[in-house]
Image (cartoon, rainbow, N blue to C red):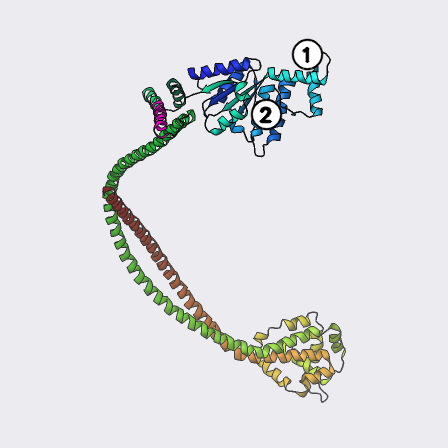
Amino acid sequence: LVCFLYMLEHLSRVARVIKSSGGNALLVGVGGSGRQSCTRLACFMADVSVFQIEIAKGYDLNAFREDMKKMLTKAGGGGEATVFLFSDTQIKDEGFVEDVNNLLNTGEIPNLFPADEKVAVCEMVRNAARDEGKAPDGTPTQLFAYFVERCRSMLAVVVCFSPIGDGWRTRLRQFPSLVNCCTIDWYTTWPSDALVAVARRFLQTIPDLGDDVRSSCVEMCQSFHADAHNLAVRFKNDLKRIYYSTPTSFLELIQTFKQLLAEKRKTISSLKTKYEVGLEKLTTTETSVEGMKQDLIALQPQLVEKTKQVSEMMVVVNEESGKTEKVKEVVAADEAVASEAARSSNAIKQECEEALEEAMPALNDALKALDTLSAKEISEIKAMRNPAPPVRIVLTAVCVLRNIKPVRVKDESGKMVDDYWPAAVKMISEMGFLQSLQTFDKDNIPPEIVKKIATYTVKEDFQPDRVERVSKAAWGLCMWVRAMETYDRVAKVVEPKKESLREAEAEYDAVMGKLNQKRAELQKVVDQLDGLNAKLNSLKKEQDDLTCQVDLCQKKLERAET
């Protein structure tokens, strides 16, 4: 609150009314003139509580009367000094004003309390009435009369009305107690000293405002409001129309001035900041231009030197590329020769494998047949004293193939002949006989033995079917002898081809050794070329970076100068 003489005069009036027993006040003035503020301050000074209704949606006469019950119970029943502050802006129903009129006139509102609540109120004041001797008989009528009397003494009603409009005059005619039972206090236009005090108080919160400027602003606001009031008087005299220049409009004037001042300060501060930043940028740009000029002068020789290095490196790379192409051609020719040698070697190898395919199945079958022989079957052959011709001839062929000497015996005519049977029996009696057949050196059979074996294989008694009918063990040995003969015959055909294969493979190895050497030389040349290309690319990148820096520096200088 802002205190000034005009405000203190009205404050003293309201305070006197409140302190008077049964005193009520009618404060007449436009909105914002300080009626409620003075009332609340006076109540605070007098240590009196203020009661005021709160207008909300749906607030009607019943709600208003409930509030009145609470207020009267508090004042009359509780004995607490209370001020009922009521404003014309709170009138939602004319019944509110009628009840206030009755309260001012008689101290009560007719038919406010129902019977049960009325009994409760009487009980609240019974002790106080007995102590004061106001209700000697203690009847409800005496007690309620004491309650009403106490309400009039403990409750003060302050009504705030605005003189603007017809509602003010109409209510005064309809409810005369507003005038008859109230002390009327008129809140007129604020004097100039009040305007100055209020303006000085509100403008005091503006920061960064000199005392001279602040005083001038206070005088300006006071002058604006006073001139507006004078113009309102002139407006009424000339046009018979009323314009109210209220304290609220004066406060709005001050608030508008503060808001405009803050906006203008913000705008000017923003412009000032922009100008300062612009000047700073200009200074920075000027310094940057000098730096960029020096950078451009330093970059030009570097760019020329880097261009020269790139040109020289490109010449070296082109020469090395030519050498590399020549080496590639030589390597390609050697690869063609190696491919031809490999093709020839593979052809010879394939012929050898095809020839061996004839003998290998018979050899494998013979070895499998040997695996099927058991010691029992071998023992059967050993037990033969006079073996059948197929068995004898098979065993003879095995001895010949293993180069076992026969025994010289006499035949029936007394002539000495070779007999292989004793040697054969001794041969098959050996522990590792079958194993020796499986590991027999089939690649180094003497030609005379092979020739002799050939004379046995064509005989009728050496045929596998006939031998198998006589002895299974002899059949296995027969198959083995035949396989050895077949393998030797095929090996004689394959051996020259194997020699050719070895020569071809040796030639291929020599060619591949030479080719690998050339490939290593080519790889070395390619690696050198790759290294030169990498160096060339690095130089080109450095050249491009320098070119970009020079171009960017020139563009920045052009933009800075323009």
217 is higher (above) or lower (below) than 553: above
Residue holding disc 1:
134
Percent x, y of residue 126: 70, 15
Percent x, y of residue 50: 56, 20
Frontmost residue, 162 versus 507: 162
Label drawn at residue 99? 2
Horizontal side, residue 471 vs residue 70: left or right? right
User: Residue 449: which quarter of the image?
Assistant: bottom right
Percent x, y of residue 307: 25, 51
> At 71% from the left edge and 74% from the top edge, which residue is drawn?
373
Answer whether residue 178 is visible to the viewer in this image: yes
Horizontal side, residue 125 vs residue 17: left or right? right
Q: Residue furthest bottom?
A: 413
Quadrant where the C terminus lies?
top left
Q: Secondary structure at mark 1?
A: loop
Membership of 55 in magenta stretch = no
User: Residue 412: which quarter of the image?
Assistant: bottom right
Q: Secondary structure at mark 2?
A: helix
User: Residue 402: which quarter of the image?
Assistant: bottom right
Q: How many marks?
A: 2
CB of mark 1 within 8 Å of CB of mark 2?
Answer: no
Pointer 2 local density, CA inside 10 Å: few below 14, some 14–19, many at least 20: many
Rounded to the nearest whole Å, what is the CA distance between mark 1 and mark 2?
26 Å
Counting residues from the start of the chain, the first of labels 1 and 2 encountered is 2
State the extent of the magenta-drawn residues as a range: 220-240
Percent x, y of residue 331: 37, 66
